[in-house]
Image (spheres, rainbow, N blue to C red):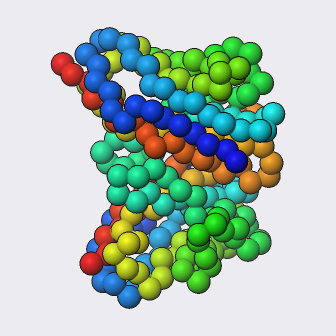
């Protein structure tokens, strides 16, 4: 299984500011995924990030609000822009293991609180 | 549209007993995958078990087994010999066919293991 790290693990931010979350994987992967989990809710996919192409955003998420970079096969960033209290969530990146089982592994998450 | 339904918001089980967490799904894809994840209070998402739609046998991983009933579109998680450390939120998820490989999650079941 892939080992995934995220930075920061948690942060408290002022409204109107931006935060960039980093996701690092210990092996090369084609697809990386960014999910949001609002308090007491399930996970919702924000976007899929492939190396060398623009991220693909899900309905309700836009690039201006959640710009994503994918400079290589082991790293990605998600920026939460112009934050409001409604952006307070856990943000998780995940990767697919490849092979037959298509297992997806998640990073430890970034717990964001916007005041 | 694909959908995952978990009808049990919360479950209690006595330590050392077995427990079944329910999951039903809806999809028009012929090829799909079903996952279970555990999320402790720390927030990380821990992969537990995977079942492919064409797998003839139910998946097992240690104390976890997946009761896959394709005709009923159900994929229940069975945890045998519950331990106090099993207390967590459990999410059922589905990966549909196609190139995106994104996961769609259910609303989760909060399991409490009692001594």
Taking A59 as reference, is B114 left or right?
A: left
Image quadrant containing the C terminus of chain A:
bottom left
Residue B73 horizontal side relative to residue A94, left or right: right
Residue B89, position as x, y percentages in the image: 37, 38
Taking the spot 37% from the left edge, 36% from the top edge, the residue there is: B9
Q: In the figure, is residue B103 to the left or right of B88? A: right
A44 to B108, vertically: above or below: below
The spot of residue B4 in percent (x, y) is 57, 39
Q: Is residue A5 visible?
A: no
Residue name at image x 40 percent, y 60 percent:
A38
The residue under the point 27% across, 29% down is: B112
- The answer to whether A33 is drawn above or below residue B22 in the figure is below
Task: Give the total number of marks visible in the rendering.
Answer: 0
Query: Can residue A41 be seen here?
Result: yes
Which residue is at the front of the view, B66 or A93? B66
- Residue at x 70% of width, y 48% of height: B1
Quadrant assignment, res A53: bottom right
> Furthest residue to the left?
B115
From this view, report whether residue B17 is shown above or below residue B34: above
In the image, residue A61 lies at what x, y percent?
A: 58, 71
Above or below: residue B38 compared with residue B78 = below
For the N terminus of chain A, the image quarter is: top right
Residue A29 image-quadrant placement: bottom right
Apparent side of residue A96 relative to residue B5 in the rendered image (left or right) = right
A78 or B10: nearer the eye?
B10
Q: Position of residue B33 (x, y in %)?
A: 68, 35
């Amino acid at each position: 299984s892939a080992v995934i790290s995220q930075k920061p693990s948690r942060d408290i931010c002022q409204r109107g500011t931006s935060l960039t979350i980093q996701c690092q994987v210990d092996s090369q992967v084609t697809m990386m995924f960014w999910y949001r989990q609002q308090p007491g809710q399930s996970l919702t996919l924000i976007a899929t990030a492939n190396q060398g192409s623009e991220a693909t955003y899900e309905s309700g998420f836009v690039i201006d609000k959640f710009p994503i970079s994918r400079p290589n096969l082991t790293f990605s960033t998600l920026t939460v822009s112009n934050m409001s209290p409604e952006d307070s969530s856990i943000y998780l990146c995940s990767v697919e293991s490849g092979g037959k089982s298509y297992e997806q592994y998640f990073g430890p998450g970034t717990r964001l609180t916007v005041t | 549209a694909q959908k995952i339904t978990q009808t049990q918001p919360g479950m209690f089980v006595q330590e050392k007993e077995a427990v079944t967490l329910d999951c039903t799904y809806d999809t028009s894809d012929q090829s799909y995958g079903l996952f279970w994840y555990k999320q402790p209070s720390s927030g990380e998402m821990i992969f537990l078990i995977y079942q492919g739609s064409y797998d003839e046998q139910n998946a097992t991983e240690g104390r976890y087994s997946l009761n896959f009933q394709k005709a009923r579109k159900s994929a229940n998680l069975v945890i045998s010999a519950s331990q106090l450390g099993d207390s967590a939120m459990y999410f059922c998820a589905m990966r549909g066919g196609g190139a995106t490989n994104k996961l769609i999650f259910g609303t989760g079941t909060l399991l409490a293991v009692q001594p």
